[in-house]
Image (spheres, rainbow, N blue to C red):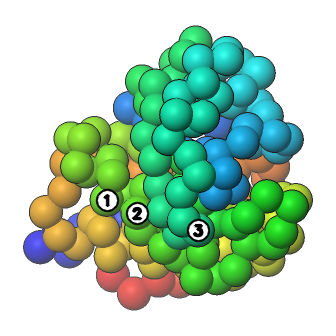
Amino acid sequence: MDTDWRTRIVIRQGDLAEARVDAIVNAANNDLMLGGGVAGAIRGRGGPSIQAECDKIGPIRIGEAAITGAGRLPARHVIHAASMRLGERTSERGLRDATRNALRLAAEHGLKSIAFPAVGTGIAGFPLERCAEVMLAEARDHLRWLTSLERIEFVLFDETAREIFARTLKKMEP
């Protein structure tokens, strides 16, 4: 059991598609259609191979995660965390389950590093502060047990999101 889990969480502002990690997490819909927002940036920079792999896998249930290659992205993989149905909103349960399953899938594949966006806070309308609480709690719970993951990054699009995640992490019980 790891009581020093905080040292393995990195919170920063940046572009998720440029993260140099084993896997980046796509804030996905359950059809695994790479539309706008984070998914659109992944599709645009990574190339068509990612959507082609998603087409062979999807659809998946809300709360599940699937792994593909990362095309031309610096990461080796994309983990698609399905927190919503296409055109709908993200629920807390969908976010919690999708985050947990993305972490589990990374560990099953022996990955050492993963980078998440603030899943569900864009077009899916999930509140940013609650997103930080849910995602960081899932990261903490995952890191408390045996896992291949050595680093979990939260790569946030703007300074406000970075501040909210950092403040939330600081308030969490060790």
Q: Is residue 21 left or right of residue 117?
A: left
Q: At numbered mark 1, what does the secondary structure look like: helix, strand or loop?
A: helix
Q: Which quadrant of the structure image shows residue 128?
A: bottom right
Please give the label number shown on residue 62: 3
Residue for badge 1: 104
Q: Residue furthest bottom?
A: 173
Residue for badge 2: 101
Can you say whether 1 is above or below 163 in the image? below
- Could you tell me if the residues under marks 1 and 2 are in contact, i.e. CB atoms within 8 Å? yes
Among numbered discs 1 and 3, the one appearing first in the sequence: 3
Distance (Cα) linking label 1 and label 2: 5 Å
Q: At numbered mark 2, what does the secondary structure look like: helix, strand or loop?
A: helix
Question: Looking at the image, which residue is at 58% across and 12% down?
Answer: 72
Distance (Cα) linking label 1 and label 3: 15 Å
Q: At numbered mark 3, what does the secondary structure look like: helix, strand or loop?
A: loop
Among numbered discs 2 and 3, the one appearing first in the sequence: 3
